[in-house]
Amino acid sequence: MVPRVAAAMWRFGIAEAVAYRASMFVWVLATCFPLVSLALWSYLAEEGPIGGYDRGGFVTYFVAAFLIRQLTSAWVCWDLTRQIRLGELDALLLRPAHPVLHHMMSNFAALPMRAFMALPLGVGVLIFAGGGDPVAWGDVLRTLPTLALAWGIVFSIQLAVACLAFWLTSATSLYEAWLAVHLVLSGYLLPTSLFPERFAEVIRVLPFHAALGFPVEVLTGRLTHGAYVEGIGLQCFWVACFSVLAAFSWRRGLTRYGSVGA
Amino acid sequence: MPACGTDVRVSRPPHIQVSGLSKHFRVSRREAGLVAAMRAVFRREWDTVRAVEEVSFRVTAGERVALLGPNGAGKTTTLKMLAGLLHPTAGELTVAGYTPAAREASFLRSIALVMGQKRQLSWDLPALDTFELNRVVYGVSHSDYRQRLDEMTELLDLAHVVSRPVRQLSLGERMKCELVAALLHRPKVIFLDEPTLGMDVTMQLKIRHFIRDYNERYGATVILTSHYMGDVAALCSRVLLIADGELRFDGDIDELVKSVRPVKRVSVTIPDKRHRVGMSEYGMVVQREERVVLDVERGKVSDVIAHLLSREGVRDLEVTDPPLEEVLREVFERRRV
Amino acid sequence: MSAGERRVGAIRVAAAQFRVCVLRALQYRMQFWTEGVLGVAWSLMGIAPLLVAMQYRSEVAGWGVGGLLVLTGVFTIMSGIYGAMVQPALAESMAHIRRGSLDYLLLRPVDAMVSCVTAMYSPWRLLEVVAGVGLVTVGIHREGVFAWEGLALGVALAFLGVVVLYAMGVLMLAASFRALRLENLTFMLEAMLDFGRWPIGVFRGLLKAFFTFVFPLAVLTTFPAEALLGQSRAGTLGVAVLITLSFMFAARIAWNRGIRHYTSASS
């Protein structure tokens, strides 16, 4: 029953994604900071490599970071907080299907469209920048599971924060604060390996890096097999952590929603 | 004691049973001004809002019942508790044998809630897309879905409407689509919250007719809240009057009118002022202009009519029930019926 | 109304609208954190790449640590002004256009364009301006290059930068008359502004020309920063004035076209 319901929700999500394609395209463009970073670092690398990255390396890194962010993004935080605030959650609760399943499938359904819009942009930048380090097919395959886990981390964190909207009026600002920290520490603004050594050691085990920097490094072939396995393990750990937190918050939040209403 | 015709109802098992239902909300007291705002940071004071207080009633399967009351009376809160969206503070509640608050899947599959203000249809997509999603979520077979969709589309005249994006539809068309979406899974209990709010008269008539027709065909229990007397008069023989969270009356509309205002409203046109004397001996004078309106005790109506018709310069005599609005206003102003 | 009267009217309208928004902002004190502090955090996080870069290189395109601090400070000021004054007005106007309630703005005895660009303010985001000024002060102090002429030139160039920001906003508004779902464009513009965090010298050739004339980040951040550091090249002011005037001109034309399209299209 559940797979059939999930499939129907997925189809529904595709229809919505097509209807919202114009907005989506603008959002893809608005989340292009890696390209901004690329401008700086490719300039700096002209006189010589920095921290193991030469110019080509930076091009590949930042294009990969841009694409991977598009493919692992979620927006359940904004959607769910709006639904809680405006009472739109009622309609979802009346259906004999889990509202979170609905959000997940909507998210999955939109990712192909985002990829479709982001890939040409990424390729365009690659060409304009004169090409980057080549990427091996083996690395592409090894990246796929890390993408799923990275998405899991992002989604479960957003869900956990969104559940705070059952109690607070501005849960989204909390997520935006998290996001600001995330962008700095995840490898989105610059590769985490470039940070001062002691600092880098610490941030590379945090969920921020696991959600973005790690998949990017797998794709650009910068990790040994041992580091790869370690990283996957770390991702699993963080997904588990935040999923448990999200499930707990959801249950408590729903009880409160039921006693207080919209 | 609320008047209710219990004899008919005891013979069949109740489909919906509510006893001692209460819902209290704790709201923080917030006053205006800078000093109060700063004080509120350190010490919050709480008030209790008694939205629903000790409400009890029973509904048998297939009945059509209206929850009537002024704004903020607790009608929507009661409806949401029946649908399982709100947890009661106290009291017991059974709908179709389930406890709504448990939100079991089979319970959710046997009810539907349609709210006039909030929609379940996706805004940018055609209604058909949401129907299809609901079909799978509620486990409706393809053949059943096709048959029910065709039937309702024809009844509600929606052939060209369901394939256009919902945001392009008028309010009436949107409401009709909402109804279809809610009824595709043939719920046994239908909750309607202000279903004809903001619509023109023709549309209101169509929707009332559809709901009544549905209830008669499939025996679904209908509970609706409304402001409009037209909704109530057309759809429900039984009303529950709720004011300040309390159940003030439970029973037949006509009985209510008879017990609260045991009069008939007699109106007559008397163009000449001189012929308008002595009206007060017939009953209470509501209006003394060219159109004279009197409230006459039921027993005396035939005598009064005879007297009036024998007078000079009298025409267009009309006898009706007192307007429901006035009756209700009187009920809500008293403590008990 | 004479041109002078119309101009005074515009300032009065802007001031009145600002006052209303300040009163509202004082009521929603939570926004001090959600808009003010968060805005500062977002602006300042962009300094991380520069600080890390300083570990590997002694300078970036000829800019040392102090200079980069000043540049980031100017960027933060611009970002704050955009977020506090330009973006809210644009979002509100676009919402009016979408809902069809722009008519009320058009009925006012004020120039419609002025009404739109003063439609809303988010005063708490001015905190970024304060933070930016702080950064600039620290940077100038570090470089030890304070001069009154530099300050005057810097402020003048910054003012021109703000005018360019407004002009770009008006261009977006004019575009949204034709295509209704363009509210996210304001966020895209904000994202593109991030390119202004780096000195213009980081870009080469075509890209440099683009960011000087087509999307004039140079005017917005690099020119004022250079001036404050006393490193302005001759003719910078002239170039900036030229670019600003062209943008103002283009914006006004686009606005007139857009409004004509709107008033003739609506029923």
Image: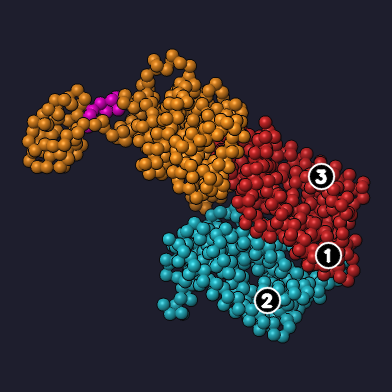
Chain colours: A red, B orange, C cyan
Residue B158 in the image: state x and y as whole percent: 47, 41
Cα gap from disc 3 to disc 2, whole angstroms: 44 Å
Residue depicted at x 65% and y 35%:
A5
Q: Amino acid at mark 3?
A: Pro
Residue C45 vertical placement versus A145 (above, below): below
Quadrant in the picture for residue C39: bottom right
Residue B148 vertical placement versus C116 (above, below): above
- Which residue in the protein does label 1 denote? A131
Q: Earlier in the sequence, mark 3 or mark 1?
A: 1
Q: Crowding at label 3, few (<14), some or many (≥20) Cα neighbours within 10 Å?
A: few
Q: Are marks 3 and 1 in contact (CB under 8 Å)?
A: no
Name the chain under label 3.
A
Name the chain under label 2.
C
Q: Residue furthest bottom?
A: C234
Q: Can residue B60 be seen by looking at this rendering?
A: yes
Q: Is residue B148 magenta?
A: no
Q: Quadrant of the N terminus of chain A?
A: top right
Identify the secondary structure beneath mark 2: helix
Report the mark closest to the observer, 1 or 2.
Answer: 1
Identify the secondary structure beneath mark 3: helix
- Which residue in the protein does label 3 denote? A145
Q: Which mark is residue C213?
A: 2
Quadrant in the picture for residue C234: bottom right
Tell me which segment is drawn in magenta: B257-265
Residue C151 in the image: state x and y as whole percent: 68, 78
Residue B262 in the image: state x and y as whole percent: 25, 26
- Asked whether, in this view, residue B332 is left or right of residue A191, the answer is left
Q: Quadrant of the C terminus of chain A?
A: top right
